[in-house]
Image (cartoon, grey):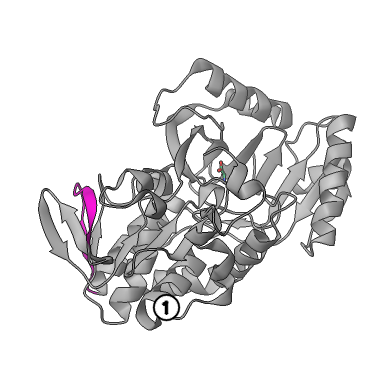
Amino acid sequence: MCGLGIGWRLAQAGCRVDIFDRGAIGRGASHAAAGMLAAGVETEPGELDLLRLNLRSQQAWPAFAAELEAAGGQDIGYRDDGTLVVALTRDDERQLRFIHDYHCRAGIEVTLIGGGEARQREPYLNPRIPAAVWSPNDHQVDNRALTVALAAAAACAGAQLLPDCEVEAVRVENGRAAGVVVAGETVAADAVILAAGAWSRTVGGLEPSAVPPVRPIKGQMLALQMDPEAPLLRHVLWAPGIYLVPRRDGRLLIGATVEEKGFDETITAGGQYALLDAAWRALPGIEELPIAETWTGFRPGSRDDAPILGPGPVDGLVYATGHHRNGILLTPVTADLVSRFVLTGELDPALAPFTLARFDPALASGPASMAAE
Ligand code: GLY
């Protein structure tokens, strides 16, 4: 998704842009995601730089969505209904209060509410829910519609979309990225943007220091079909072990497992059972709903779970990868700030904590450099 966003911005600025995809355009994590724009509730302790970037992108979302819908004339399902996080037991409640306090101290707007108030917002919740957190700024977008709209907008602005064209290597000449190799042929370019999601480290032609430490983190998901006229759920809902995302067309997305299994696409009974069981505990009425789809996706995870953005050791090679759980949320800020870097050479201070240099053993220290890939 971020590659499409950057390509759109560069094409708008008058650049000649080729967007290569190893499969159909935008069918990687962009297609598999749930589209949550959850800068608030997905924040974990120790991620303050990332929180700042996430919040900046979250604030950019309404204007980005409006601009994209105007450019392409298509609805991308942006919904600003907020998010509810529920506890199911007293133990969950203690954890919810702890993370709520942390979020408040981090400046995130969240409110602790009782089970009764949670059920006023979502009447079909398990009646035993003791407490919940209301997050008014965590919204959602239909990521599949977004992919289609971004691809159309990029093409309309003049970018060339090249599906089923895997980039085999970055062509480096005299220490500078001079283009990419596709089907054995070099396509020359002034700048190369490496935005291949979970596949980013499989692109050849780079010295080890220039290979982004990104690995696939498998997630299984499923969708149930609600009656769109009488949906069982209206807000994005987080409960222990899962999230549920209701779409306008009645699809109810349930996600996601977190599995370190490389590019394993298997949909397992255990994975689906865990999702359905956790969802049923929060919203028992799902047991009546038909299953519409099951799928897997691969989050591009970096060593410290933060994205890798901007320049690296090879001139002309720019990174936009490793977005892990936040690819859709970070699409606007990645598109704007990475394209600006390509156009002007100026690195926005918001990107400085996220360059590849943080993994350089000569420069980095602390957990990020020590953690396993
Ligand atoms: N951001 C949701 C997920 O990674 O499953």
In the image, what residue occupies the spot 40% across and 80% down?
345
In reply to whether residue 162 is colored magenta, the answer given is yes
| Residue 324 rendering spot, x and y as whole percentages | 52, 47
| Residue 61 rendering spot, x and y as whole percentages | 54, 68
Would residue 301 appear left or right of 74 to someone viewing this image?
A: right
Residue located beneath label 1 in the image:
340
Would residue 162 appear left or right of 232 to someone viewing this image?
A: left
SS majority, magenta: strand
Q: Secondary structure at mark 1?
A: helix
Residue 203 versus residue 227 in the image, above or below: below
Crowd rating for badge 1 (residues with CA inside 10 Å; few <14, some 14–19, many 20+):
some
Is residue 74 visible to the viewer in this orientation of the structure? no
Ligand 1 shown in quarter: top right
> Where the N terminus falls, by quadrant?
bottom left
Find the residue positioned furthest to the front.
Answer: 362
Would residue 186 appear left or right of 269 to someone viewing this image?
A: left
Would residue 265 appear left or right of 24 to someone viewing this image?
A: right
Q: Which amino acid does the dot numbered 1 rest on?
A: Arg
Residue 130 versus residue 45 in the image, above or below: above
Among the 4 quarters of the image, the one containing residue 89: top right
Among the 4 quarters of the image, the one containing residue 229: top right
In this picture, which residue range is highlighted in magenta?
158-172
User: Which residue is more in the foreground, 215 or 89?
Assistant: 215
